[in-house]
Amino acid sequence: MRYSGNIGNRVVDKKRILVILNLMILFDKVSKIYQKDWVALQDITFEIDKGEFAFICGSTGAGKTTLLKMIYKDEEPTRGAIRVLNQNLKDIRKREIPKFRRKIGVVFQDFKLLQDRTLEENVAFSLEVTDTPPREIRKKLMETLTYLRLSHKKYAFPYQLSGGEQQKVAIARALVRDPYILLADEPTGNLDAKSSEDITNILLDINYRGTTVLMATHSISLVKKMKKRMLRIENCRLVQDK
Amino acid sequence: MSLRIGIREGVRTITRNASLFLLSLLVAAISLFLLALFSLVTVNLYKSIELLDEKIEIVVFLDRTANVNVLEENIAKINGVEEVIFISSEQALADLKNELQDTEEILNVFEENPLPASFRVKLKSSFRNAKGLEEISGKIMLLAGIEETLYGGELVDQLKRVTRVIVLFDLGLLLIIIFSVIFVIFQTIKLTIFARSTEIEIMKLVGASNGFIAVPFTFEGIVQGFIGGIIAFLLTVVTYRVAGFFFGNLYFPHWWFLLGTILGGILFGLIGSGIAVRRFLK
């Protein structure tokens, strides 16, 4: 296994020490079985390196969401080991989960925005939970909203935005914290073709800037167009990795 | 988490779902009011039992030859006697006249004062029962110059049994009411938290710690308990005033009740939100 010897090399940033690891995600013979005999995933083994962009493909119910949930520790594997950001997920205690999750951004098909908060508040919220100083929050907000071209709508509520815009807000919320990994669970599932392309391009750009991106989708055509790594899940098993 | 964000989120939790907040506030206020009302009944019950208890005494009638001072001293020495009050025959007559008021002419048939002098012997609380009464009365009868003693005897014990049953019943009811109040407040808070389950899910997703998620709900619980407590107190005051018309002077320590309803409200709010949030976060 590659991860056994690779601890990662330290790079000193101006203000903080960033531990940059080559290996971002590792699944080692992971199975997830619900209620005795309902198998969701079986013997899944793969690695995702830093800076990679990978699609997870499979029809609805194939286990894509379960796989992503296991990465941000919302689900526990029944068998096998998972390492994320060089941490064995088994070793992360319950009360350490919030801290762990702050390093990972997650985007969903249904956006999961707080409906009674403005676009700006939704994005700022994810920094507030980490005790970020207000000045720093304002700075990060401006950067992120400008990057995603959302600044002009920062006082709008989610219901006043189109689906594509809402998904951008969800991405902004994940991105504002500079996550190491961005997980996207069918981010284009509720969007029209144009918005889907927009969102996919944004994810590609985020990846281009250095963030590892893992995107689950059922649309094979989209994946083929992108010419990126594809992990294909069928009948609970990983059947293709290219 | 900074206090600023905690309070802001708490206020937001309240204002955003104002109707739900008002509903649970109403539930808390009514529950606390019931509790306060019942406590008022209990306090008054205890007061009247205490008063009744203090009235248990032995009346000792003296014959005309009795040496009052020596007797008073000797009775006071008996174990279990708290106080000895002397009532002269003149005093007794005056009291009687006072009681008879308009029909005091009846007394004119007597040429001289027919009433003997007496002692009212008050007992220590552990002797205020049939056995104690009998024992002390027996000892008093042994003294020279005593004509007769009067006391309730068996009646006192019967009265005590009845009051004991009433007190037990009252305490049982109080306990049931306390549990129902906690249950109702807990259920209401759970309801408000369920209404915000998506929000909690999102908070967890962006890495909010359990503490961060719990603070606004705890804040809401405290505010709810505080306001609910004040409303409950006001309702109790109104009820006390109305009840005053029917039952005369009731015992109602205002400050204790105000403190009790507010602290009780906050405590219930804290416990209720604590349990509900903890359950939800699991």
Image: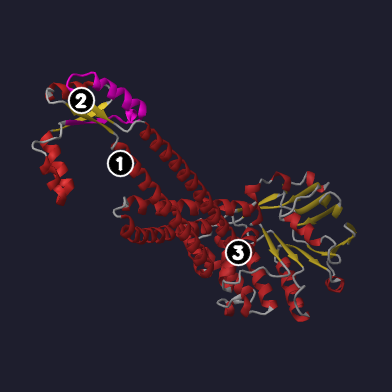
Q: Which residue is mark 2?
A: B147
Q: Quadrant of residue A124?
A: bottom right
Q: Which residue is mark 3?
A: B196
The three-letter amino acid code for the residue at tag 3 is Arg
Range covered by the magenta-colored residues: B118-146
The three-letter amino acid code for the residue at tag 2 is Glu
The three-letter amino acid code for the residue at tag 1 is Leu
Please say whether residue B275 is one of the residues in the magenta stretch.
no
Q: Mark 2 against mark 1, which lies toward the viewer?
A: 2
Q: Which residue is mark 1?
A: B51
Answer whether residue A88 is visible to the viewer in this image: no
Alpha carbon separation for disc pair 2 and 1: 28 Å
Question: Which chain is mark 3 on?
Answer: B
**Residue under the image location 68 percent in, 70 percent down:** A111
Q: Could you tell me if the residues under marks 1 and 3 are in contact, i.e. CB atoms within 8 Å?
A: no
Comes first in the chain, label 2 or label 1: 1
